[in-house]
Amino acid sequence: MKTLTQPGTIRPNFIHLKDLVRIEYEFIYHINDGYSIDNLRDFSSKNQLLFQRLGSKQQQMNLMMVDSIFPILLSDAVIDIFLYGVNSFSQYVDRKNNDIVVNTQFASGYVEYKLKQFIYFLLFSDLNLDAPFHGHTDNTKVYYLKNGQEEVCYYSIYDLKELQCLLVGKMKLTVNRAKSYILKQDAHLFLEMRF
């Protein structure tokens, strides 16, 4: 006997938070003309790299859907990850809070808000794909994870704030140094995000 879902009911799509696909972006920086650098180990300060673009034009356009300057903001985070060992969005926001000179575009409140918005799109849309992002979200997704007491916690769109806070602190950010390289006057850094 065939069972049918009642009209108007939505069947949840359960996804284990640990099974999130690793997300990767290639950031391309021009090496500041005042420096002659042949090896990634030779970078020691932010002013040596000038962000140019992402390796995928489509991914860059998708990130601009979060905010027109979001690729620039994320490129700044990549340099903090590469140079200073930052490994989460919360550490990046903390570094912004401790900057002596605060760029109003990248004030910590703005940065944290945009990173949470970015996480929302990563979880409930196809923003990270190398295909055009149209802003559509899939609210049937329900993420689950065991907490410290071995209880299963569920996070739907209704638990978005809690889920965003969790991932701002726990999503692991790394620059894949094995894939990153220098070609002529450009540095190619590969950002990886995983939970």
Image (tube, rainbow, N blue to C red):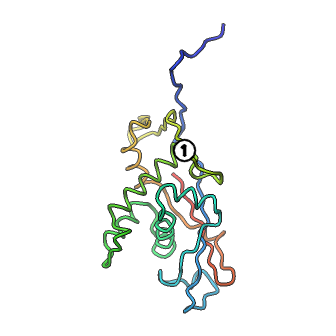
- The quadrant in which residue 175 appears is bottom right
Residue 54: x, y in percent?
A: 60, 67
Give the farthest residue toward the top. Answer: 1
Could you tell me which quadrant the N terminus lies in? top right
Q: Residue at x 35, y 74 (%)?
A: 103
Total marks placed: 1
Q: Nearer the viewer, residue 19 or 57?
A: 57
Give the residue displayed 41% in from the left and 48% down from the top: 164
Q: Position of residue 150 (x, y in %)?
A: 42, 37
Q: Which residue sits at x=54%, y=83%?
A: 43
- On the rendered structure, is 101 left or right of 61? left
Where does the image place residue 112, in percent across and percent down from the top left? Answer: 37, 59
Mark 1 residue crowding within 10 angstroms, few (<14) / some (14–19) / many (20+): some
Q: Could you say which is closer to the camera, residue 14 or residue 4?
A: 4
Give the residue type that dot 1 points to: Ser
**Residue ID for mark 1:** 125
Q: Classify residue 83 as left or right of residue 98.
A: right
Q: Residue furthest right?
A: 183
Looking at the image, is 46 positioned above or below residue 13?
A: below
The kind of secondary structure element at disc 1 is loop
Report the side of 136 relative to 109 (left or right): right
Above or below residue 43? Residue 168 is above
